[in-house]
Image (cartoon, rainbow, N blue to C red):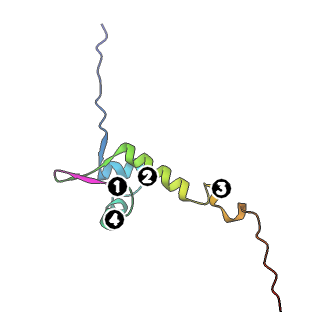
Amino acid sequence: MHQASQKHESAFLNLPKAAEYLGLSPNTLYVWRHRRQGPPSFRMGRRVMYRITTLDEWVHAQEKADSRTNRSLNPLAQKPQRRSKVRR
């Protein structure tokens, strides 16, 4: 007989796990938090926590804001602007 085992997945990650999830060092994430940069976090008791959905949204926002991945922001993809004629 098969016994069903359900592993409870948390919707939150502590700082070291969030850093691993993002592929960053925990120190980078710690410094970003201290400087109020990086993904939003909050305290749950004594622990700094990150909501996984918020991490995903933050990564998506970073992709949209980067001209290398967002073609509409790439200055090389823009039409050249005409110079205005200078009258003397």
* CB within 8 Å, label 1 to label 2: yes
Mark 3 vs 4, N-terminal side? 4
**Foreground pick, 12 / 27:** 12
Residue beneath label 3, please? 71
Q: Amino acid at mark 2?
A: Trp
Residue beneath label 2, please? 58
Mark 1 vs 3, N-terminal side? 1
**Residue 57, how many percent across, how many down?**
44, 48
Residue beneath label 1, please? 40
Mark 4 vs 2, N-terminal side? 4
| Helix, strand or loop at mark 1 | loop
Residue furthest left as drawn? 45
| C-alpha separation, residue under disc 3 versus residue under disc 4 | 28 Å
**Residue 44, how many percent across, how many down?**
20, 49
**Residue 48, how many percent across, how many down?**
25, 53
Residue at the (53%, 53%) spot, across then down: 63
Callout 2 environment at 10 Å: few (<14), some (14 to 19), or many (20+)? Answer: some
Residue beneath label 4, please? 36
Q: Amino acid at mark 1?
A: Pro
| C-alpha separation, residue under disc 1 versus residue under disc 4 | 8 Å
| Helix, strand or loop at mark 4 | loop
Mark 3 vs 2, N-terminal side? 2
| C-alpha separation, residue under disc 1 versus residue under disc 3 | 26 Å
Which span of residues is magenta-colored?
40-45
Magenta includes 44? yes
Toward which corner of the image does residue 65 lie, by quadrant? bottom right
Numbered mark located on residue 60 in the image: none
**Foreground pick, 74 / 32:** 74
